[in-house]
Amino acid sequence: MDSAVAADPKYTAETEVVSVQTAELVKEIGIPPCPAVLVEFTAEANKEEPDFRRLSHLINKDVALAASVLKTINSPFYGLARKARTVHDAITLLGLRQTSRLIAGLLLRKAFASSKSPAMFEYWDSSAKIALVSGYLARELDAANLEEAHTFALFRDCGVPALLVRFTEYEQMLLETRNENEQRRCEMERAQFGFDHGLVGATLAQSWNLPQETWQAIRVHTEYAQPGFRDHPASARFTTLIAITLLAERLQRAHRGTLDPEAWAAEDQFVADVLGPVQDRLAPLDNDIKRILRQS
């Protein structure tokens, strides 16, 4: 393993959590606090004998959230054999862990609803499409759990809206890096702000009680080109999720006409190394992927 990687605190078991000093720094950005309904839902779900009636009540108190939960779980994305008629049905069908992830994803956009900038709109549009394609690819390529891939993709870049809200100049940076890969964008973020959107996003996801493997993957998701990244135990378990979302993003960029193959070469190589040759396996999925990208 490369010594530079071994020395990097992001890759050591002792500091897989966001450091206190850096966490305090990014908190100054104004990371939205974990929504009360998610706090209460997580606390109840973590009990030895969770009360499903109370869990249902927590969601039903927010009519818009309850409607979104039912609409989402009954969508073709989940492909469930039977429809959920109530929130209680939804929780039973999905399970507590997946329902918690679903709620967090639905509340994420609401947390930044005050911003109406074009860059914010483009971010949510791209993020939603990449997340849906990631979940679809995870299932169809039999590479990962659908819901885990979808949640990771949805929160992967959640540091971006936080930076958009905090720094007026960040919108111009997004425009300038529209065709760049995430490594290049992170380099520019660190040079200008002292941290990147991966750190901000990991802190948000951690404070929102997302599973540890999710926010840890968010923290290191831009480091895939580092020597030894795939070999280190602190990162190896994240590689499949990262590869799936990179593939989904490539397909989404190609769909909207912003893919620069030269700038995406490292990503293509990483996807091939992790998932193997994918072109032949993607061919039968092409129509479904295009439909997701058009409709989502």
Image (cartoon, rainbow, N blue to C red):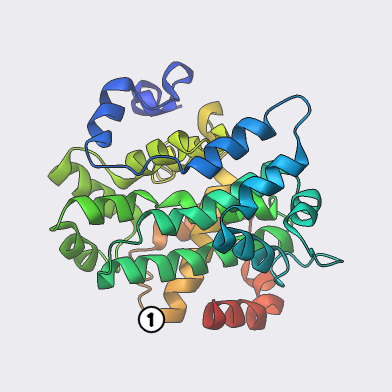
Q: Is residue 72 above or below residue 38?
A: below
Q: Residue at x 43, y 27 (%)?
A: 11
The structure residue drawn at horizontal position 46% and vertical position 34%, both measured from the top left corner, is 206
Q: Nearer the viewer, residue 285 or 166?
A: 166
- Report whether 195 appears left or right of 249: left
The answer to whether 116 is drawn above or below residue 26 in the figure is below
Q: Residue furthest top?
A: 14
x then y, percent, for residue 111: 39, 53
Report the side of 118 relative to 125 (left or right).
left
User: Height in image: 128 above or below 46?
Assistant: below
Name the image quarter holding residue 95: top right
Residue 156 visible (yes or no):
yes
Q: Is residue 228 visible?
A: no
Q: Report x, y in % for residue 186.
A: 27, 48
State the residue position of label 1. 257
Give the vertical position of 47 relative to 247 (above or below).
above
